[in-house]
Image (cartoon, coloured by chain):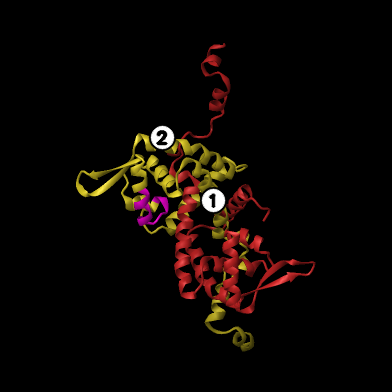
Chain colours: A red, B yellow
Amino acid sequence: MSGPKLKSGGAAAHEADVGSQPATLGEIGLDRFAPYLMNRVMGRWNADIQKALREFGLTTAQMRALAVLSVIPGLTIMELSVYTVTEQSTMSRTLDGLESQGFVRRVARADDARAREIFLTDAGAAAFARVWPLMRDAYEKMLAGIGEEEREAFLGTLRRIVRNVRRHNL
Amino acid sequence: MSGPKLKSGGAAAHEADVGSQPATLGEIGLDRFAPYLMNRVMGRWNADIQKALREFGLTTAQMRALAVLSVIPGLTIMELSVYTVTEQSTMSRTLDGLESQGFVRRVARADDARAREIFLTDAGAAAFARVWPLMRDAYEKMLAGIGEEEREAFLGTLRRIVRNVRRHNL
């Protein structure tokens, strides 16, 4: 009765018993490792978008700031950095550029003059409206052949993963 | 009868009628736009991994080369660039670094001496085995609370999306 216990004994064996986790990436397989698959997808997406943005004279960070502000007006620079997945220092320079093009304006918050909220101007909204169709088309190509139900499930899992990995409650 | 038709008339109105595609990102919502969600996830993942790799003296591109070669030995530099989502010129320098550390070797292909196949050395395999546990742990954290069936469905959709966006048949 103690034989098998001794053979596999102790904490290491307990972990091995629990062991639903495969030991190596080779055992999981690249095609079953979500970070690999998502890097493949987003590497292609970001490269395509960056290339397409050139004719609009926009960087990826600028486009992301316009995109996010078109959905959520009045963000602070910290919030905008999180939503655009851009370092705060990079976002600061990005906003300088957008402001000089007349695409955003920063407004002191009523209850705290040090806090600045960022808004699109009409010109900024129009600039994003010009690039959006190509992103929407690229998005439809990305999801081609994937039905409504599968899209919903996929988005639901992605939202859960964002909650699992994010540092800020945004 | 012609009133409404004139008001909305022509091709634009036809598109609006077809319009299962929402017109704006705001109508879709950031939380329902997969590229936004995947950029959030992979921005965090890649930053965390890059930071953790520092103590192993590896760059992200080096780690990815070791990871992919641990699963698929004998790739060419072009194939390795695709799998690691790394520019070929960057991958060339990356392999120079890995070769000088004794982690990879390049072997002329038997039937074509110009083609070089890349393999991990034992030291290279050991180097990846040292960093893999932290990636596996980060992966489990990423998928925390997501059951087996949902993971399978998610991975299946991701593989389909990779096929939709990839340029090479890899």
Q: In the image, what residue occupies the spot 44% across and 59% down?
A: B165
When asked about the image quadrant of residue A107, the answer is bottom right
Pointer 2: what residue? Answer: B126
Pointer 1: what residue? Answer: B47
Q: Quadrant of the N terminus of chain B?
A: bottom right
Q: Residues within 10 Å of mark 1 (few under 14, many from 20)?
A: few
Vertical side of B14 occupied by A47: above or below: above
Reply yes or no: does residue B34 show up in magenta: no
Q: What kind of element bears circle 1?
A: helix
The range drawn in magenta is B83-95
Label disc, if present, on residue A87 of the rendered structure: none
Which x, y percent locates residue A95?
A: 60, 69
Reply yes or no: does residue B91 show up in magenta: yes
Q: Judge whether residue B23 can be spotted in this image.
A: no
Q: Judge whether residue A61 can be spotted in this image.
A: yes
Chain letter, disc 1 residue: B
Which x, y percent locates residue A84?
A: 59, 61
Dot 1 and dot 2 residues touching (CB under 8 Å): no
Q: Which is nearer the eye, B81 or A139?
A: B81
- Report the amino acid beneath label 2: Ala
Q: Which is nearer the eye, A143 or A61?
A: A61
Chain letter, disc 2 residue: B
Vertical side of B1 occupied by A147: above or below: above
- Report the amino acid beneath label 1: Ala
Which x, y percent locates residue A93?
A: 57, 67
Q: Which is nearer the eye, B155 or B36?
A: B36
